[in-house]
Image (spheres, helix red, strand yellow):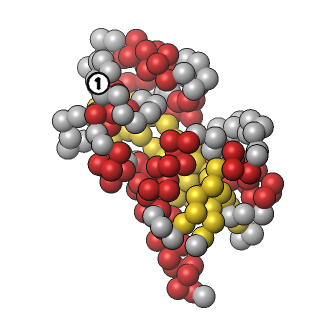
Amino acid sequence: MTELLVATHNAHKKEEIQQMLGEGFWVRSLADYDLHEEIVEDGNTFSENAKIKAKYCFEKTGIPSLGDDSGLVVEALDGRPGIFSARYAGDHDFGKNIAKVLEEMNGKTNRRAYFVTVLCYYSEAGASYFEGRVYGNLLAENKGHKGFGYDPIFVPEGHEITFAQMEAEEKNQISHRRRAMDDFLMFLASKESEK
């Protein structure tokens, strides 16, 4: 079984990644290693922030680590909230964050947006990056109680319901994190076949 340290304190994210990777992986989080200090994400891009997290974990533990930076990119808001998605109106207070986005979107007809995830895998070989996106539209009000983050206002293309109205299994089949994770798994498979 491959041990993988995911640079998060977020139990939802750890669980979601474990579901996506399946039984061949033992996904651990920062809490499992008693690493509780806040990792300062001062990068200017999703890739930079993902690397900061993955490198920190690898240097602390020596375990191959996966850093993940994700966010919501809204066309009509010039790409905001972007890398500031988790702390747009209050640190990890998604009720306030959603309210701020909805307020800024008030009266805007272009509701196009996408979720993006950039994964950085950091090991003794250095950093490798994997990106996934899912495009869709923003609603004017919250719908659904599942998921987390901006899920209640985001309807992915080709669907009639928000991420927050979907069962976890359905969301995990089409999400931005799933797409990045698929690329990551292909990368690991190619590494395995080289051995």
Residue 192 visible? The answer is: yes
Whole-percent x, y for residue 192 in the image: 55, 81
Tell me which corner region of the image, top left, top right, bottom left or bottom right, holds residue 161: top left
Whole-percent x, y for residue 193 in the image: 53, 85
Whole-percent x, y for residue 76 in the image: 38, 24
Looking at the picture, which amino acid does disc 1 mark? Lys
**SS for tag 1?**
loop
- Comparing 40 with 64, the one in front is 64
Image point (43%, 15%), residue name: 99
Up the image or down, 191 lies above or below 177; here it is below
Residue assigned mark 1: 143
Tell me which corner region of the image, top left, top right, bottom left or bottom right, holds residue 69: top right
Residue 53 visible? The answer is: no
Up the image or down, 72 lies above or below 107; here it is below
Query: Most extreme residue toward the bottom, as rendered?
Result: 195
Whole-percent x, y for residue 187 in the image: 52, 71
Give the quadrant of the C terminus: bottom right
Image point (56%, 42%), residue name: 11
